Image (tube, coloured by chain):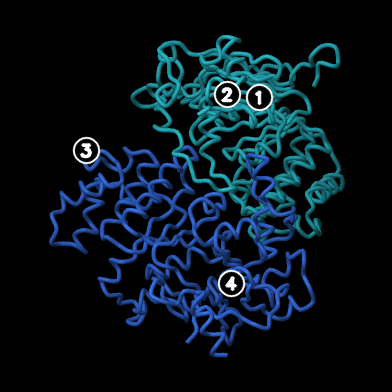
Chain colours: A cyan, B blue
Amino acid sequence: MNESNGKAKEPLLEIRNLSVNFKVYGGVLRVLDGINFHVNPGERVGLVGETGCGKTTTMKAILRVLPMPPAQIPNGEVRFRGRDVFSMSQNELVRMRGQGMSMIFQDPTAALNPVFTIGEQIRTVIKHAEDNKRIKSEEIQARAVQSLREVALADPERLLNSYPIQLSGGMRQRVCIGMALSTNPELLIGDEPGTALDVTIQDQVLRLLQDLVERKGNSFILITHTLGVVRQMTDRVYVMYAGNMVEVAPTRRLFSQPLHPYTQGLMAAVPKLSGGGITEGIPGRIPEYKEPPTGCRFHPRCPHVMPVCKQVKPPNFNIPGEGQEVACFLYDEPSKVAAYQAGEVAAS
Amino acid sequence: MTAQFNRQQQLNGAGEDVILRVENLKKHFIVGRKGVVKREPITVKAVDGVSFNVNKGETFGIVGESGSGKSTIAYITMGMYLPTSGTIYFGERDLFDKRNQRAIDLKKEIQIVFQDPGSSLNPRRTIKQILELPLRIHQPEKDRLREVIRLLDMVDLPRDYMHKYPRQLSGGERQIIAVARALATDPSVVILDEPTSALDVSVQGKVINLLIRLQKELQLTYLFITHDLSVMRNLATRVAIMYLGRIAEVAETQRFFEQPQHPYTQMLLSSIPVLTEEEEALKPERVLSTGEIPSPVDIPTGCSFHTRCPAVMDVCSEVDPLMVRASEEDRDHIVRCHLFDQTEPVRIHPT
């Protein structure tokens, strides 16, 4: 998309070869294993994977909120607007978290403080993001009202004086979205923003989020394990498995032609609304991080496993043309990719 | 009238193959009191007049959002709650004729698998001890070790798992143990309360396929409760959808998904995020989800869905609709909505 400007724009957020370990009693958990990830300005990026694959650890690393210790970062870097997050001063960090990026959590009930009114919480956020500059309280109030109005909540003045417990789950999540957007962040991170809600309410909240992101042009990272939501809401998707990014592709492409055996298995495992039974899913289970499998971490569960998979960690192979990258030795030669696309290698 | 009743008797299968007969079931919880003098109770009508039949060997699905009362029905069927009014028959026997003193041979017939095996299995017991408990109570004469082995074989888990603790198993395996425990008493009805909601997609298929296989082998009847419509589509034979303690629509599964009639069903189906264009095409025309789910303490008058319904009419806020047939061609397709002719209400249990 950005190539039309002559040269590709610098990404807003970039993670390069990041590893995160947790030192625990009796060993080291190697959770993130050299991941690469980037978000361009205005882009909506999905990050999917199952429980325990490292999605949340990745986000915590970006926000630099990993508890250290036990967490260790042996290698890698995170750059936000070109600045290295790990070497930022405390002031810069606060500014980055306030104006640069904000986050929407899975459970709005836990994200809001039950003993403060909605208004107090939103005003604190706005004040903080303004670097504690002298800002008139009327202006803060006006911006708080505005942010609730944007998330389609009726009667915002009254809502500002209510406590979270007085609102329904869907309204609370709207408040959280409003709060996250009240500082006009360049990057919005949604960690399972609809998962705790009922289907019809989730649908409303996600549609709202989509409209807002589109209108305001924020970059957006959507973390979720629900593939259907990713398909609706993002431009590009990263698939994560056991601390590795195994595949990245434009959303349409990923859903029409998943290449990594894990992505294929995951997609096949989702029960279809059109019926036709349910596949057995992927055999085995997510590996222990204490002693992760050598080579490709997926190899013990992979239906196409080859000898090389057990020894060497697969690098990302570029699939020409579509901006798809896959970390799997099945695609290490262009001819194999062509054969795959011609349908000679059966997708299982 | 009698002719009409006879007809219903046939179509709702009030004959021999009905295994569970739920009759006008109500469960109201008192959650508080208001007023200083009168202390009038504040009630939550978790289940408010629900009737349906479950046929032998079928998988009867109940879908609904949180607070719709689907789990309450499961717990009443298990005997964990007493109904406020109405009752459930297992075959010819009233499950509540002795109030909470359910006969042990009735307890044996109805078992349950809960949502989260992490909390439904005792972490301090080995798998063997977990599986032995129902055997001790219900089949004391049998050789317990042999039975435990038989159960593990039946669910395709290695026999040496009996010496492990739940935490040593993966989430999927734990849920399979919960299934094995439910089957230990050799029941005829198994209630599945969100059996795969706590599991990752890559393992839920295994559990579901196991359930399907066991149903065939052991001629089980399932009462399957979930909020995941895609799983429902692939497992249930008939589906009932609940909204605020009441059934809104009941139909055979394929019909339920392909020709939903109730506006709420249509809204719910069109809200599901799906993976393929093919599924997208199957969804009903986009019914935008609007409004909030009302508080169960304060259920709207008339049809409880009227506050969110895109097809709302004046009558909806005043009169509670009756259960009527959605179409002439499929007489088992029942819907509770004013959009359909109200003159010939369906009685699920003609007596």
Quick one: label 2 or label 1, which is nearer the N terminus? 1
Secondary structure state at the residue bearing disc 2: loop
Dot 4, how many residues are within 10 Å of its Cα: few (below 14), some (14-19), or many (20+)? some
Quick one: label 3 or label 4, which is nearer the N terminus? 3
Chain assignment, label 1: A
Chain assignment, label 2: A
Q: How many marks?
A: 4
Chain assignment, label 4: B
Label 2, label 1: how far apart the Cα atoms are? 10 Å
For label 1, the residue is A249
The amino acid on which the numbered mark 1 sits, given as a three-letter code, is: Ala
* Above/below status of A63 relative to A315: below
For label 4, the residue is B331
Residue B285 image offset from top left, x and y in percent = 74, 54
Residue B334 versus residue B306: which sits nearer the camera?
A: B334
Write the residue at 63% across / 74% down.
Answer: B325
